Image: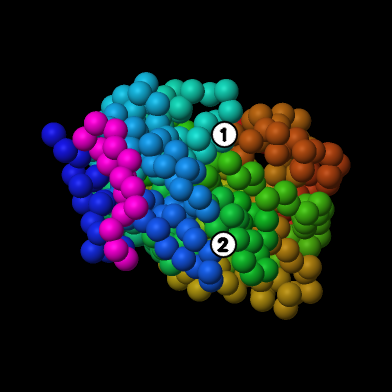
């Protein structure tokens, strides 16, 4: 059977005149044409290679015939697609093309990609890398928008009946970050998280709260199958911001006495419970008088009211009981949340230096000076023993602590406070 690529190659209509020679090998033939270029005689071979017409020119007929014989021989052997392939190479080529046919991929492109993969993997076999990648993606739903993850988490937390304030805090943080890093949560980078946390002039404490919330968001996404389950999230890789070294701001007993003796009725519960029980301002804002058990000398802070979301029992000292006893203890301890904002201006009006969390810092410092037990104070304050020991130990003397817990309401007409509290403050 005559090779089509050869029969179509010897088309005299495409050349000037008839060929001066035709070299044959079996059914394959390659024509040679004679021509002149700038007075020089040239011999041209014409044949088809991979569906494209090719021409090769020589200065003498013998060289042209030798090349024509080589080309015709290769065509006859069935290697018209590559005239330089050896028989064993031809079989490999045909096998490779057969494997690639269902994929529709070019052989050269596949080889280039394979070589590049092996270069990057080094000694790691390509199949091992592929199996590892497949295992990573097992059960992993990619391309889930971060906004969808936020919606699902907020809905779940609302079903858990968290406080409205806590839910709004989560919503604000998550929505702001979703606007900063739109797109799939699987494509969010540690750099994007760090840039968002470090935006603006915020304290280390605030930034660490944001990071903690985002770690919670990304851990939720992992549990939902929106991130690889066997890998740490990009949020987990970030460390908390190291706070600047600052002194713990505490009030002196004389300053606290000034505040208590002149406090408006609406601020008195906040000052007394903050200074003599150490509750956080936000915790007092969520507190109801039903949790203040004067007969048992304890404040029972429920999990939904505490910052750490765990129940706490805080002892009521004798002087705190004395301040609270005359009050109308019904409903919320702080009915008007604007009262919290007024404390700072009131302290400044009374000439008392004021810092953030001054009441809580003062209580912890004086309390540990009396009980000398960081673990106990940590349990009461809802903090860690490490923090208590590091920031509050030995800031005040035992005498100052006795004076602090000796701040009682003035007796009518006495013009001075009652005596000191028993040093063994009830736990």
Q: Which residues are magenta?
A: 16-31
Give coordinates of residue 256: x percent, y percent: 74, 60
**Badge 2 density bin: few <14, some 14–19, many ≥20, Cα 10 Å:** some
Residue 361, above or below 313: below
C-alpha span from label 1 to label 2: 37 Å
Q: Is residue 410 magenta?
A: no
Looking at the image, tell me whether mark 1 or mark 2 is earlier in sequence order. Answer: 1
At 32% from the left and 66% from the top, the residue drawn is 16
Give coordinates of residue 300: x percent, y percent: 46, 41
At 44% from the left and 55% from the top, the residue drawn is 43
At 76% from the left and 30% from the top, the residue drawn is 372
Q: Residue furthest left?
A: 1
| Lateral position of residue 224 relative to residue 252, left or right | left
Quadrant of the rendered structure where residue 370 is?
top right
- Which of labels 1 and 2 is toward the front? 1
Residue 109, above or below 197: above
Q: Is residue 21 magenta?
A: yes
| Lateral position of residue 371 relative to residue 61, left or right | right
- Taking depth in this image into account, of 28 and 421 the one nearest to the observer is 28
Residue 253, above or below 95: below
Q: Quadrant of the C terminus?
A: top right
Please give the label number shown on residue 196: 2
| Lateral position of residue 239 relative to residue 396, left or right | left
- Residue 186 visible (yes or no): yes
Determine whether the residue tagged by mark 2 lies in a helix, strand or loop. Answer: helix
Determine whether the residue tagged by mark 1 lies in a helix, strand or loop. Answer: helix
Please give the label number shown on residue 119: 1
At 21% from the left and 51% from the top, the residue drawn is 8
Give coordinates of residue 416: x percent, y percent: 76, 61
- Taking depth in this image into account, of 409 and 282 the one nearest to the observer is 282
How is the rendered protein coloured? Answer: rainbow
Please give the label number shown on residue 203: none
């Amino acid at each position: 059977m005559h090779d089509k690529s050869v029969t179509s190659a010897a088309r005299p209509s495409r050349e000037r005149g008839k060929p001066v020679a035709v070299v044959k090998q079996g059914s394959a033939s390659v024509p040679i044409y004679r021509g002149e270029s700038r007075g020089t005689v040239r011999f041209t071979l014409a044949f088809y290679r991979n569906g494209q017409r090719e021409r090769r020119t020589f200065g003498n007929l013998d060289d042209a015939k030798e090349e024509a014989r080589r080309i015709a021989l290769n065509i006859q052997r069935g290697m018209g697609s590559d005239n330089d392939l050896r028989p064993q190479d031809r079989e490999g080529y045909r096998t490779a093309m057969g494997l690639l046919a269902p994929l529709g991929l070019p052989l050269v492109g596949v080889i280039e990609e394979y070589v590049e993969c092996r270069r990057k993997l080094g000694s790691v076999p390509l199949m091992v890398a592929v199996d590892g990648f497949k295992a990573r993606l097992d059960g992993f739903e990619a391309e889930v928008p971060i906004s969808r993850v936020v919606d699902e988490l907020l809905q779940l937390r609302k079903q858990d009946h968290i406080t409205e304030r806590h839910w709004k805090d989560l919503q604000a943080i998550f929505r702001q970050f979703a606007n900063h890093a739109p797109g799939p949560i699987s494509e969010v980078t540690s750099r994007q998280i760090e840039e968002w946390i470090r935006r603006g002039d915020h304290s280390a404490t605030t930034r660490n709260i944001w990071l903690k919330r985002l770690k919670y968001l990304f851990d939720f996404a992992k549990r939902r199958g929106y991130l690889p389950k066997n890998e740490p999230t990009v949020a987990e890789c970030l460390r908390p911001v190291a706070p600047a070294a600052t002194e713990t701001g505490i009030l002196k007993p004389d300053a606290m006495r000034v505040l208590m003796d002149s406090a408006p009725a609406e601020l008195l519960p906040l000052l007394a419970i903050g200074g003599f029980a150490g509750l956080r301002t936000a915790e007092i804002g969520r507190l109801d008088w039903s949790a203040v058990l004067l007969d048992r000398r304890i404040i029972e802070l429920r999990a939904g009211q505490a910052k750490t979301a765990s129940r706490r029992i805080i002892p009521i000292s004798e002087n705190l009981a004395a301040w609270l006893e005359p009050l109308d203890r019904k409903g919320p301890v702080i009915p008007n949340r604007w009262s919290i904002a007024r404390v700072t201006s009131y302290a400044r009006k009374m000439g008392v230096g004021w810092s953030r969390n001054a009441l809580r810092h003062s209580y912890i410092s004086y309390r540990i000076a009396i009980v000398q037990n960081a673990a106990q104070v940590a349990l009461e304050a809802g903090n860690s023993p490490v923090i208590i020991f590091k920031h509050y130990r030995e800031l005040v003397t035992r005498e100052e602590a006795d004076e602090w817990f000796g701040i009682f309401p003035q007796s009518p007409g006495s013009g001075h406070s009652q005596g000191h509290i028993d040093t063994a403050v009830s736990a």
